[in-house]
Image (spheres, grey):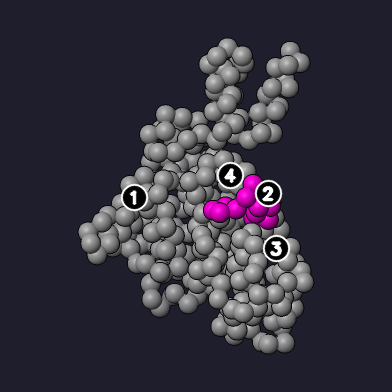
Amino acid sequence: MELIKIAGVNYTYSDGTEALQDINIVIQSGEKVAVLGANGSGKSTLFQLFNGLLEPTAGDVYIKGLHAEKKNYKAIRQIVGMVFQDPDDQIFSPTVKQEIMYGLLNMGQPRQKISGIVNWALQVVGLEGYEDKNPYYLSGGEKKRVALASIIAMKPDILVLDEPTAALDPRGVDQLVDLLNKINKELNITLIFATHDVDVVPLLADYVYVLNKGKIKLSGLTAEVFSHKQAIWDNNLRLPRVAHLVELLVRDGFLSTTELPLTVGEAKRILQSKLKS
């Protein structure tokens, strides 16, 4: 099912900056999509079109068949859940429970059902028992999970995340990647995330769009996009570090392979096969 369709979209800010130019994107239900690009490439502007925070200067945005315009914004914002880069920009309630309840109350959920939904959302993100904690005193990773729980509780079809791994330590990144994959698989929520952290992309995305100066420069399955090595560099990005390591080993004659591993697991398989041969 087609959940998002971006057709010929341009966006120009009031100062004349062309943030997006002729953007065409189709995202199907259940997909995990990464939007890659350096700072200033247009990622955040694109995401604000998904739920009506911005309206395109030209072109059309459709969310689950609804044209993104004022009369449809309420319905669209129940379909698209947004998680900001900095959870402190999103969390404002004095307790975790109140934070998750806020969106549910605005949706008109009956109060007698809300407690059960809050408990379910906290269980999904692994924060059982945090109901009465003050989000201000939680770690960065825990705050990200609270922000996720507050959106998941409203059961959107689409979860949009801006730089989801920003400011997380390595363990926090691993935990968040596992959680997002679980949300996609078990809750059938379509994931769309913007990042310039290429190492996390093969772990989380099935499909990739590369943005540069407001234009889509590359798109395709994750392995296909990263196979265009020179184009990746030309768009101010890089290959995942493990792929770059294997490239160096091949260049220096220590390894012979035409495969380009994108994860540690893929690199391990290649190295084991070469050591056994």
In the displayed structure image, the side of residue 241 where residue 124 appears, left or right: right
Q: Could you say whether the residue bearing mark 4 is in a helix, strand or loop? A: loop
Q: Are dots 4 and 2 in contact, CB under 8 Å?
A: no
Give the alpha-carbon distance from disc 4 to disc 3, as whole Å: 19 Å
For the residue marked with disc 4, what is the amino acid?
Answer: Val
For the residues marked 1 and 3, what is the alpha-carbon distance in whole angstroms?
34 Å
Q: Which residues are magenta?
A: 165-181
Q: Residue at x 46, y 29 (%)?
A: 229
| Of pointers 1 and 4, the one earlier in the residue sequence | 4
Q: Position of residue 274 (x, y in %)?
A: 70, 17
- Disc 3 target residue: 125
Q: Nearer the viewer, mark 1 or mark 4?
A: 4
| Residue of label 1 | 214
**Foreground of the two, 6 or 149:** 149
Mark earlier in primary sequence (4, 2): 2
User: How far across and how far down the image is residue 120, in percent?
Assistant: 74, 71
